[in-house]
Image (cartoon, rainbow, N blue to C red):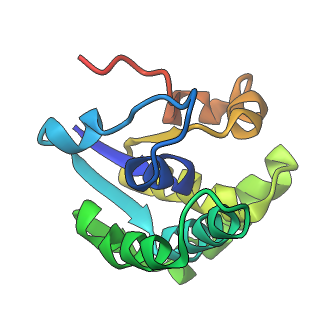
Amino acid sequence: MKYVVDASIAIGWLVKQENAIDHTYLLENQNILIAPDLVFPEVCNGIWRLVSAGYVTPKHGHKIASELSDYFDKVFPCAPLMKAAMGISLQLNHPAYDCFYLALAEHQNVQMITADLRLLNKTKTTPYAKLVVGSEMDSS
């Protein structure tokens, strides 16, 4: 299967956190994993937060960031997704950066996997609901 993966899932591959669902099965099942290039600054920001909070060392943070691109089969530039992402953001009244992932899913006609409960709730009763899959998806 082909999926858009957001930063909330990608960071979980790289940093194991208590009470978090393990999404490494996405890496093991011949899936095609794609993301907008926004995934890199978002994951780096998440790593910075984890380093600042003392959950990972700066050295480990650098290692994590250097491995991130290995997990994606293709990364798409954000600029061509901007108009669609902005429209989705305004329609859902949700932060635009999350909507770039949704715009890519719509453009590629695939589902987006996220652990972002706010985004899941915002899309629940919209036409975008079919494009967004929560992190609890079946791993079989």
Residue 24 is situated, as x and y percent measured from the top left of the image, at 30, 39
Residue 43 visible to an observer of this rendering: yes
x and y percentages locating residue 19 in the rendered image: 57, 27
Q: Nearer the viewer, residue 128 or 113?
A: 113
Q: Do we see residue 72 in this rendering?
A: no
Q: Residue at x 51, y 67 (%)?
A: 39
Q: Which quadrant holds residue 109? A: top left
Q: Residue drawn at (34%, 59%), measured in percent from left and top?
A: 34
Position above or below: 101 against 119: below
Name the quadrant of the N terminus.
top left
Residue 107: give x, y in percent of width and height. Answer: 44, 56
Left or right for 139, reference 103: left
Residue 127 occupies which quadrant of the picture? top right
Residue at image location 47% in from the left, 47% down from the top: 12
Task: Decide: is 28 above or below 42.
Answer: above
As drawn, 7 above or below 47? above
Q: Position of residue 129 (x, y in %)?
A: 61, 29
| Quarter-of-image position of residue 23 | top left
Whether residue 54 sits left or right of residue 33 in the image: it is right
